[in-house]
Image (spheres, rainbow, N blue to C red):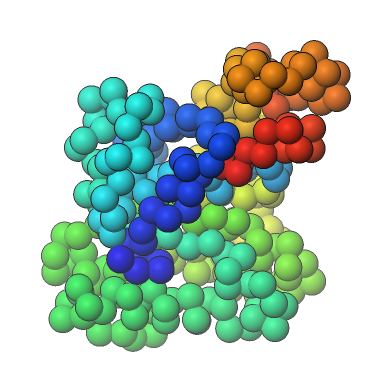
Amino acid sequence: MGIYVNPGNTSFRQARNSKIYVDKSGLISYTNQVLDTLQKNLCVSRPRRFGKSMAADMLTAYYSRGCQSGQLFDGLVIEKDPSFQSHLNRHHVIRLDMQQFLFNESHLDIFIHKLQEMVIDELTPDFGDCFHVDQYGLPGVLRQIYARTEQSFIFIIDEWDCVFRVAKERRDIQKEYLDFLRGLFKGAEYVELAYMTGILPIKKYGEHSAINIFDEYSMLAPAGLSQFFGFTEGEVLSLCAREQIDFIQIQKWYDGYILDGLPLYLLCPALSQNLNPASF
């Protein structure tokens, strides 16, 4: 079990153990369908408090070889899916939270190099005899591993757009980052699935559009994934009934969004204060 390569399931386990947990495991049914297809590159863009990180933690717990997560999915929707056992903890996962590399503005000039260095260090125990590190960095290493072993990887990247929020005036850093993502994902046979989350939509940044291979699942175009991010009205009703909270008051305080005709509620202060849903 590593920090970045085949990590464990601690974050998802803590969500499952929390007082309030809402089952969003149906998302796994969709990601299983697009594994190793031309639709394997997904980017989910939502405002904060829509459960993007929880979903990333869930996917990591499900796919990663670095843990045994069967019990964490007991009783969840995905457990009944025919594909459930086929992919449970059977994939090499590289999990990155870009905020962890950019919690200080001084990291802007080094984070891409350090990110690659840390991931390569964790790949070395299992694959060190399959690669040598050269100027192509992590993409070059992963290509060598795939060429020699045919081992592919699932990438789960949270807060992919953090760079554009931290480095608003640093076009040089933005370009370097987009070039890195393009080199990592475009035409890469070693990618089984690339799942990214962010606040900002994928778009052309300046003169660069390095990640146009991704299908975006945004607020305006959720493409059937809307129910997996935020609380549905039925879920809020159920939570209010269980905790003896007046749903009408919650509804008046915060009337939610409507996506694909489905009313959705993000984690509003009223719910947070009364329900303490740590999983979101």
Query: Split into 4 quadrants, where in the image is the C terminus?
Result: top right
- Label tally: 0
Which residue is at the front of the view, 243 or 89? 243
For residue 166, which quarter of the picture? bottom right
User: What residue is shown at x 42% (from left), y 78% (from top)?
Assistant: 118
Percent across and percent down for residue 234 are 61, 15
Residue 177: tell me if it is visible: yes
Which residue is at the front of the view, 275 or 44? 275
Relative to 93, is 236 on the left or the right? right
Residue 236: tell me if it is visible: no
User: What residue is shown at x 47% (from left), y 53% (from top)?
Assistant: 11
Relative to 125, is 236 on the left or the right? right
Above/below status of 34 relative to 170: above
Relative to 143, is 273 on the left or the right? right
Above/below status of 189 relative to 33: below
Percent across and percent down for residue 274 are 73, 33
Which residue is at the front of the view, 267 or 139? 267
For residue 268, which quarter of the picture? top right
Query: Split into 4 quadrants, where in the image is the N terminus?
Result: bottom left
Above/below status of 110 relative to 219: below
User: What residue is shown at x 48% (from left), y 75% (from top)?
Assistant: 115
Percent across and percent down for residue 179 are 53, 68
Percent across and percent down for residue 241 are 64, 16
User: What residue is shown at x 40% (from left), y 45% (from top)?
Assistant: 59
